[in-house]
Amino acid sequence: MPTIVVEVMPKAELLDPQGKAVAGALTRLGKSQFSAVRIGKRFELTVDGEVTDAVLAEVTDLANDMFSNSVIEDVVSITVLDGSEAVAS
């Protein structure tokens, strides 16, 4: 079954306190090669049937209206996995 993955990130111009906290923790752990961390959200929607243009349009509407807050977040990608790709957990 295909899976549609929607990724949402904080707008680049906004502070990301969670990302800043993780970046600080990495530095304390000696992982100084990472200069910044940003934390976002990932949604995976399993589709029963074929992924049509109508399904993608519906997911795009959901991504913009429900999965993200357009004031502080951007939908950065909507990707269709056909089932042969491994979805990382």
Image: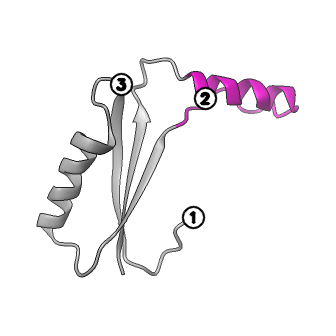
Residue 19: x percent and y percent?
Answer: 61, 29
The span picked out in magenta is: 17-39
Q: Which mark is residue 72?
A: 3
Residue type highlighted by circle 2: Gly
Which residue shows up at 27% across the image and 43% down it? Answer: 66
Rendered view: 18 above or below 1: above
Residue 44: x percent and y percent?
Answer: 41, 61
**Marks 2/3: CA–CA distance:** 15 Å
- Please tell me whether residue 26 belongs to the stretch shown in magenta: yes
Q: Secondary structure at mark 3?
A: loop
Q: How is the image coloured?
A: one colour
Contact between labelled residues 2 and 1, with CB atoms less than 8 Å apart: no
**Residue tagged by mark 1?**
88
**Marks 1/2: CA–CA distance:** 20 Å
Q: Quadrant location of the C terminus?
A: bottom right
- Please tell me whether residue 14 belongs to the stretch shown in magenta: no
Residue 36: x percent and y percent?
Answer: 64, 27
Q: Secondary structure at mark 2?
A: helix
Residue type highlighted by circle 3: Ile
Q: Which mark is residue 19?
A: 2
Residue density around tag 3, few if under 14, some if 14–19, many if 20 or more, within 10 Å: few
